[in-house]
Amino acid sequence: MSSAPSTPLHLAVGLDGTGWHPASWREPTARPGDLLTAGYWADLVAEAERGLLDFVTLEDGLGPQSSHALDPDERTDQVRGRLDAVLTASRVAPLTRHIGLVPTAVVTHTEPFHLSKAIATLDHISNGRAGLRVQITARPNEAAHFGRRTIPRVDAADPAAQEVMTGLFDEAADHVEVVRRLWDSWEDDAEIRDAATGRFVDRDKLHHIDFEGRHFNVRGPSITPRPPQGQPVVTALAHRTVPYRLVARQADVGYVTPHDVGQARAIVAEVRAEQEAAGRADRPLHVFADLVVFLDDEPGAAAARRERLDALAGEPYTSDARVFTGTPAALADLLQEWRSAGLTGYRLRPAVAGHDLPAITRSLVPELQRRGAFRHAYEADTLRGLLGLARPANRYAA
């Protein structure tokens, strides 16, 4: 896929609670009292659509948010609790027209059959704007919610951690493979709906997928007809080689977390090498960089705001992704500079949703448009179309 700077870049926004800074809920624009309402999420997504963004992602989890990597915490000064991302996306879908909706699903303890029909349903409801962000969990306490298996507690420094994580990502790759096959288990014209002859469905165009693997044995077919996009867009966040391999094997969009342009170039090269090793070198695969953003028009204002939020949180904010603090024009400079590394887009994480999302849509986007680097109107009706991805043929069609 071309990454020439002349190609308009793709922009997505990652939505999480009141924003990615843990003290964001205490800001005047935060609306913490509305967090568990449909209207709150509808307003955020409408703002993102106003900025012509490709899609939004919605975070999710199988346990309360925590400041620890593997364990719950006892904090009461940060947002805890959330709505289900897939259900939220389905509620917001009829209120939007163009923007892609990409809920997060933790696949470690959920069945591919359930997820395939949920995302297929979202694609039908949104007329072809659904995606999926695949996530794994290695938290032992979350395994305890399901009682089917245990996951040993492993710290990153423990040699056994690599084996556990590799197993979870291999399972995630199989999970996505089953989901993708189930999306194809109905041919596009399987539904006849002919009242005169009394034939609603052509049974020969529904297919068993007969998937047998180390983690799943799934017969199929799905109960939900093939999604409008054929295959909704699959995305995943990756920080190192094992998750890069999942992106290379199964994703349409991978989010990565470089901290400078050199790191971005090295990561893109590794993802492309894994893509080739997986036999998918000829398949389009977007690589987006994730950035947490504090944006203000006045120089110095964003840094001051970040310091104030850090003081409220009691500690400096850190992230897996690069944290950008500055003006929209300076961020536009960075986005254009990093494109030379082969990135095709960015997923921006607003530090304070009520402040930094409008700064993206009303200041950053116009700046990029002035530079000829971003769209002036939506040019496609589906998420695949916005990302320049063709609608794939059904693998089971004769």
Image: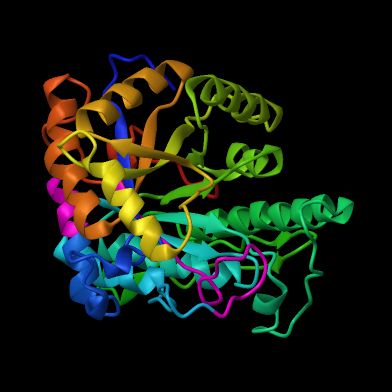
Q: Is residue 84 above or below residue 190?
A: below
Q: Residue at x 40, y 27 (%)?
A: 344
Q: Is residue 60 visible?
A: yes
The number of numbered discs placed on residues in the rendered structure image is 0
Q: Position of residue 250 (x, y in %)?
A: 58, 44
Q: Judge by depth and name the residue closer to the eye, 278 or 220.
A: 278
**Does the magenta portion include 71?**
yes
Residue lying at 37% horizontally and 38% vertically, measured from the top left: 324
Can residue 228 be seen? Answer: no
Q: Residue 397, how many percent across, how many down?
A: 50, 48
Indicate the position of residue 231 as horizontal and vertical percent values. Answer: 43, 50
Q: Residue furthest right?
A: 159
Task: Specify the quadrant that holds the N terminus.
Answer: top left
Q: Residue at x 60, y 22 (%)?
A: 266
Q: Main secondary structure of the magenta part?
A: loop
Pinpoint residue 176: horizontal percent, then vertical percent. 59, 55
Q: Is residue 83 above or below residue 228?
A: below
- Boundaries of the magenta span: 45-74
- Figure coloring: rainbow
Residue 300 highlighted magenta (yes or no): no
279 left or right of 394?
A: right
Q: Is residue 13 left or right of residue 263?
A: left
